[in-house]
């Protein structure tokens, strides 16, 4: 899982004597983005990563050890300049763990985390510019936001064809070939808004399937049959959802095969094991509210909230193989 949060930035413009002239926000600050993007990332004082690594490793700030990597970048647009903070983990964080991570971040910003950027003077024509990162308020975490470095070329459009059951949903149509089976002009399933289906990658919602509300299908994930993603669910990676399955609530499904009449709901997490290749396969009338990780096979089973079914043997076997190779 990759969690991303955007940090608002402000700027303080000083004259040559160190006197503050004015504070800059929004498009006023964006006017200086070339100077900011050239200066900040190359300055040793921008070593957020070291401080952030302490934040990850120190149990005082983050206790479950799931977060393995943390990155901070400064990015710019036509009328904005902003910071992007991302956290990477092998196993998805539950909603409660995300909230805890947010609280820990709030503590650090209250301790002056974002003010460290002000230590870096950025020469501009008007004098010296100093940047400050504001508290990003982590209720705005976005899951698995891909890091696109190229221009986004739209892969589908939303047509005027309504869903027979949900009038707010409209059918999608491919604007280019997508993966091995979807050709330019093919009609797909239904979405409520563009957020529901990523415009990048090979993800697709096939005829009959739907994604609505604040749910999202992205990367290479696929919805088939009459399956539906709703609520704030995330279907990512190479997940494949078939039949009459529903993924809802705050559920997170990545790299798994789900078919039949399965319900994945609540704060459920379904994904492959870190470092493993085996995918969870869930079918029948299973109901998943807890965590399913690794090469697990479930049929007509219930995994209640707080429960887990995990198969990490592949990862352990791989570690053993590597250790033996090193010993040789």
Image: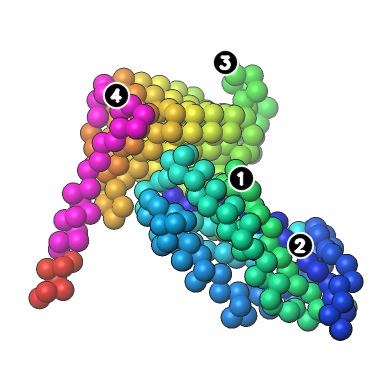
In the image: residue 26, left or right of residue 312: right
Q: Is residue 107 visible?
A: yes
Mark before the other along the chain sequence, 4 or 3 = 3
Q: CA distance from mark 2 to mark 3?
A: 46 Å
Tell me if mark 2 has few (under 14), some (14-19) or many (20+) residues whose alpha carbon lies within 10 angstroms of its own.
some
Which residue has dot 1 on it? Answer: 140
Q: Which mark is residue 302?
A: 4
- Quadrant occupied by the C terminus: bottom left
Q: CA distance from mark 2 to mark 4?
A: 49 Å
Q: Where are the magenta residues, as a range?
A: 298-321
Kindly indicate the quadrant of the structure image that contains residue 68. Answer: bottom left
Which residue has dot 3 on it? Answer: 165
Q: Position of residue 77 (x, y in %)?
A: 73, 60
Kindly indicate the quadrant of the structure image that contains residue 267. Answer: top left
Residue 213 lies within the magenta run: no
Q: Which mark is residue 10?
A: 2
Q: Nearer the viewer, mark 4 or mark 3?
A: 4
> Measured along the vertical axis of the image, is residue 59 above or below residue 182?
below
């Amino acid at each position: 899982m990759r969690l991303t949060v955007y940090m608002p930035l402000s700027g303080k413009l000083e004259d040559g004597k160190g006197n503050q002239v004015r504070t800059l926000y929004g498009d006023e600050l964006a006017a200086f983005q070339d100077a900011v993007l050239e200066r900040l990332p190359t300055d040793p004082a921008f070593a957020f990563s070291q401080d952030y690594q302490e934040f990850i490793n120190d149990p005082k700030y983050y206790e479950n050890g799931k977060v393995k990597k943390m990155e901070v970048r400064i990015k710019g647009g036509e009328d904005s300049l902003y910071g992007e903070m991302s956290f990477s983990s092998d196993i998805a964080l539950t909603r409660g763990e995300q909230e805890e991570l947010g609280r820990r971040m709030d503590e650090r910003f209250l301790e002056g985390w974002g003010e460290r950027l002000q230590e870096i003077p950025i020469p501009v024509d008007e004098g010296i510019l100093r940047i400050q990162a504001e508290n990003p308020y982590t209720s705005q975490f976005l899951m698995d936001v891909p890091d696109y470095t190229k221009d986004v070329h739209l892969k589908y459009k939303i047509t005027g064809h309504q869903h027979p059951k949900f009038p707010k949903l409209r059918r999608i149509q491919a604007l280019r070939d997508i993966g091995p089976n979807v050709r330019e002009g093919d009609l797909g399933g239904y979405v409520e808004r563009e957020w529901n289906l990523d415009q990048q990658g090979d993800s697709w919602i096939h005829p009959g399937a739907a994604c609505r509300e604040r749910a999202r299908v992205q990367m290479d994930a696929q919805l088939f049959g009459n399956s539906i993603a709703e609520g704030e669910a995330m279907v990512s990676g190479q997940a494949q959802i078939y039949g009459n399955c529903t993924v809802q609530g705050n559920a997170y499904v990545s790299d798994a095969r789900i078919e039949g009449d399965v319900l994945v709901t609540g704060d459920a997490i379904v994904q492959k094991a870190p470092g493993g290749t085996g995918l969870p396969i869930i079918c029948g009338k299973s109901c998943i509210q807890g965590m399913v990780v690794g090469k697990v096979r479930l049929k007509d089973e219930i995994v209640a909230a707080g429960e887990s079914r995990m198969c990490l043997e592949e990862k352990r076997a791989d570690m053993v193989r590597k250790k033996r190779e090193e010993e040789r």
